[in-house]
Amino acid sequence: MNKINKLLVHACCGPCFTYINYDLKNNGLLTEDNTRQKVDFTACFYNPNIHPKVEYERRKEAFETLCKMEDTDYVILDEYSLDGYIKDVVDKVLNKKEFESRCEYCYYLRLNKVFLYALENGYDAVTTTLSISPYQKHDIIKKVGKLLEDKYKIKFIYVDYRQYFRQGQKMAREKGIYMQKYCGCVFSFDSGKWVY
Ligand code: SF4
């Protein structure tokens, strides 16, 4: 793989970012050909899927606390709209069927914004901490990442970090980072699926 100069890491939350932050800093980026390369990176919080607002603020704060604690460069794209999110799910997923599922729309919503930020700020690759969670849909993450890679001509890097999920959760707990109990949207909250 070509050398990556600036990587933008979409962070879905503090706990999922904990291990990946550690790994990037200490071991470098794991690439598709199974080699490592040192890389400058910035963590980017953009998750308007998280509801209700009080939970959104809590996760945002947890992310920021971790970044400050670990001296990691970060940016927060601060947007919240319960109405907008639900309208889009009804319109784009249920009515127009632009996306096959709510989660596909949700990944697209978040990663599209992160790619746009990467484009406007000179990053040459994007990755996401969604790839550490065994509860996420990895084939859809890869599909959406590839779509956006083609759209923005910025590399999408998928690393399957699932084997480190528990370790990352343990590290986050030890650092006192807030651990959420459901994926994020109002639907995942309402389903009572307490995933961690
Ligand atoms: S379950 Fe998680 S990934 Fe799926 S739509 Fe809700 S917040 Fe997004």
Image (tube, rainbow, N blue to C red):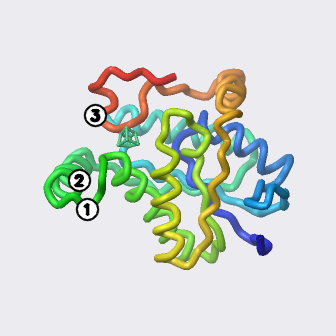
> Which mark sits nearer the N-terminus, 2 or 1?
2
**Does residue 110 appear left or right of residue 174 in this picture?**
left
**Does residue 93 appear left or right of residue 24 in this picture?**
left
Q: Are the two marked residues, 2 and 1, in contact with CB atoms closer than 8 angstroms?
A: yes
- Label 2 neighbourhood size at 10 Å, few (<14), some (14-19), many (20+)? some
Q: Is mark 3 within 8 Å of ligand 1?
A: yes
**Which marked residue is nearer to the observer: mark 1 or mark 3?**
1
Q: Which mark is residue 98?
A: 1
Q: Which residue is mark 2?
A: 93
Q: Nearer the viewer, residue 73 or 90?
A: 90
- Label 1 neighbourhood size at 10 Å, few (<14), some (14-19), many (20+)? few
Residues at marks 2 and 1, CA–CA distance in whole angstroms: 6 Å
Q: Is mark 2 within 8 Å of ligand 1?
A: no
Residue drawn at (42%, 53%) of the image = 107
The residue most toward the left is: 95
Q: Nearer the viewer, residue 64 or 83?
A: 83
> Which mark sits nearer the N-terminus, 3 or 2?
2
At label 1, which amino acid type do we have? Glu
Q: Which residue is mark 3?
A: 187
